[in-house]
Amino acid sequence: MTTKFLLAVFLFIISNSIAQNKMELTLHDGSVLKGFGRIKLDERILFRTLKDADKEFYDYTTVKKLTMSIDGSKQHYEYKVVEGCGGVRCVQLLERVSEGKVNLYQDFVSSTMYVPNMAAGGGYGFAGSSSTLYYISRGGSDTVINLRAGNTYSNRFKKMANDYFKDCNDLIDKINSKYFDRYGIQSVVNYYNEDCN
C-alpha cells in the first residue's frame, strides 16, 4: 500500500512538472491572458502564451484567479488571504469548488515522512498521508477562513456557522441536528447558496 501511494505521489509530481494545460489568467488590472501552463509546488504559475514560447512566472502579486482545462474539465483557482494567518503561506492559491453568496475552496495537501519500520526488522521506510483542507469566504472577499478538514460536526465549525449563516435559521438547525454528513461541507455551502434567501 505504501509503495503504491509513493508511486502515485511520484507520478503526480512528475506529471505536474511536465504538464502544460490550457490556462486563462485574470490579472489584478482585469486583463486576461490565454495560453498554457501549470501550477508549481510553490504555488507560482508557470505560463506560456504558446506551447513553445518562453516561460513566464506569475504569482499573487499580479494574478487574481486562473482557470485551467484538464482532460476537458475546467478547474478554477483564486489567490486568497487566509484570515488569522501569521506565518508563511498566508496567501494561498485555492481551488474553488462552490460559488455563490458563499464560496468554498479546497487545497490538497500531501506529505511523506521517513519513519522507522519495525515490521521489517528495523531500518527506515517512507509513510505518506494526504488530506483536503477547506476554506470559506463570502462571495467577492479576498480573505478566507480555514475550515481545516471541513468537519461539520465540530464545535469550531458550528460556532463559525452560527455567525456565517445567521441569516438562514433552517441551515443552522440542519447543522446542529447533524443533517449533513460529517465531512459534507460542500453540501452545507451549496444548501446556503441555493436554498437560503
Image (cartoon, rainbow, N blue to C red):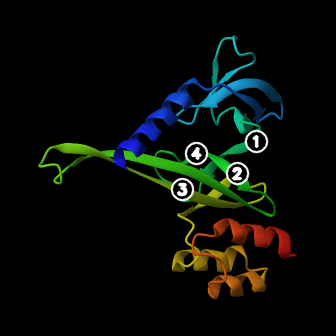
Q: Secondary structure at mark 1?
A: strand
Camera-side mark, 4 or 1:
1
Q: Looking at the rendering, in which quadrant would you find the C terminus? A: bottom right
Q: Amino acid at mark 1?
A: Lys
Q: Which residue is mark 3?
A: 132
Distance from Cα at disc 4 to Cα at disc 2? 15 Å
Distance from Cα at disc 3 to Cα at disc 4? 17 Å
Q: Earlier in the sequence, mark 3 or mark 4?
A: 4
Distance from Cα at disc 1 to Cα at disc 2? 11 Å
Give coordinates of residue 103: x percent, y percent.
73, 59
Q: Which quadrant of the figure has residue 74? A: top right
Residue 74 numbered tag = 1
Q: Are marks 3 and 2 in contact (CB under 8 Å)?
A: no
Q: Earlier in the sequence, mark 4 or mark 1?
A: 1
| Crowd tier of the residue under label 3, counting other residues whose Cα lies within 10 Å: few below 14, some 14–19, many 20 or above | few
Q: Are marks 4 and 1 in contact (CB under 8 Å)?
A: no
Q: Secondary structure at mark 2?
A: strand
Does 14 sit above or below residue 91?
above
Q: Earlier in the sequence, mark 3 or mark 1?
A: 1
Q: Earlier in the sequence, mark 4 or mark 2?
A: 4
Horizontal arrangement in the rendering, residue 67 relative to residue 143 (left or right):
right
